[in-house]
Image (tube, rainbow, N blue to C red):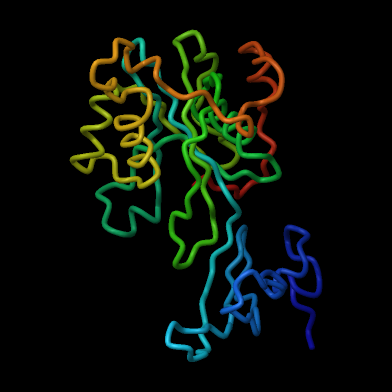
Amino acid sequence: MKPRPGVDVPDHRGRTGLDRAGRDLDRNPGVRVRDVELTSQGWHVLRRTTFDYLRRDGRWETQVRETYDRGNGAVVLPYDTARGRVLLTRQFRYPAYVNDHPDGMLVEAAAGLLDADDPHTAIRREAAEELGVVLGPLTHVLDAYMSPGSVTERLHFFAAPYTPADRAGAGGGVEEEGEDIEVLELPFSEALDMARDGRIADGKTVLLLQWAALHGPFAPPPSGADAPASVRLQPPPPCCTPPGARASHREELESTSPRRRPGHMSP
């Protein structure tokens, strides 16, 4: 048999054994993985998995599913409650363009793949690259599977404060990776209106804006409370607080230099 890149021999990214993913899963006794087939491997990986599934009526059924594995990612909503602003991006998204979006130019929260980093390190890197901003303390909002019918990615959602002084770089993304990102600083009320009327059509961004309005930094204060909404944001959980004191603007931007290879795509 001819050696198969990504299976028996290294592919263009040096990977092997890509057909082994999922074969040893046993957390759900109602699922028995029978076979995993590597159907394509570009920058990310497409697999076809055959498994037996125990239906609710007690019958076992053989099913086949294709999954697209692009790794996990992180997304952040930077906010300035003193001025009532948020930082977002606008960039061309071909998948949206080919699926009826008028021009493919989507307004989104800054996001990217984790690569080899933990979520809070990755999102600080993305904020520096895409927005040119040094984030304040990160608040972990939630984790979610955004398209669980076919995509394996789990996305880590964050929010973080910033001030005008924290905008220490131009942003715009990494040109060598094909990124051409416009930085948008919008009034929060306008961004929320854009999510409501469809001008913002990106799911992760709509979710973060709705969270900010209902439970986050722009949520109305509880009835009878004197504290303004801007100071009611809960402190970040220990798992999401970067170690040590926050670096200076220059030091942190220098420490977040691009480390990804060509072909990387953000969520």
Numbered-mark total: 0
| Residue 125 placement: quadrant | top right
* 63 left or right, relative to 189: right
User: Looking at the image, which is closer to me, 64 or 99?
Assistant: 64
Residue 120 x/y as whole percent: 61, 33
Q: Residue furthest left?
A: 197
| Residue 45 placement: quadrant | bottom right
Residue 184 x/y as whole percent: 36, 25
- Is residue 210 depicted above or below 98 in this figure? above
Residue 17 x/y as whole percent: 76, 70
User: Looking at the image, which is closer to me, 226 or 192?
Assistant: 226
What's the residue at 61%, 39% (across, down)?
Answer: 119
* 200 left or right, relative to 242: left
- Is residue 37 depicted above or below 263 in this figure? below
User: Looking at the image, which is closer to me, 4 or 72?
Assistant: 72
Q: Which quarter of the image is occupied by the N terminus?
A: bottom right
What's the residue at 56%, 19% (across, down)?
Answer: 134
What's the residue at 71%, 44% (across, down)?
Answer: 116
- Is residue 73 depicted above or below 237 in this figure? below
Q: Residue furthest front?
A: 224
Residue 238 x/y as whole percent: 63, 30
| Residue 31 placement: quadrant | bottom right
- Is residue 4 depicted above or below 163 in this figure? below
* 243 left or right, relative to 91: right
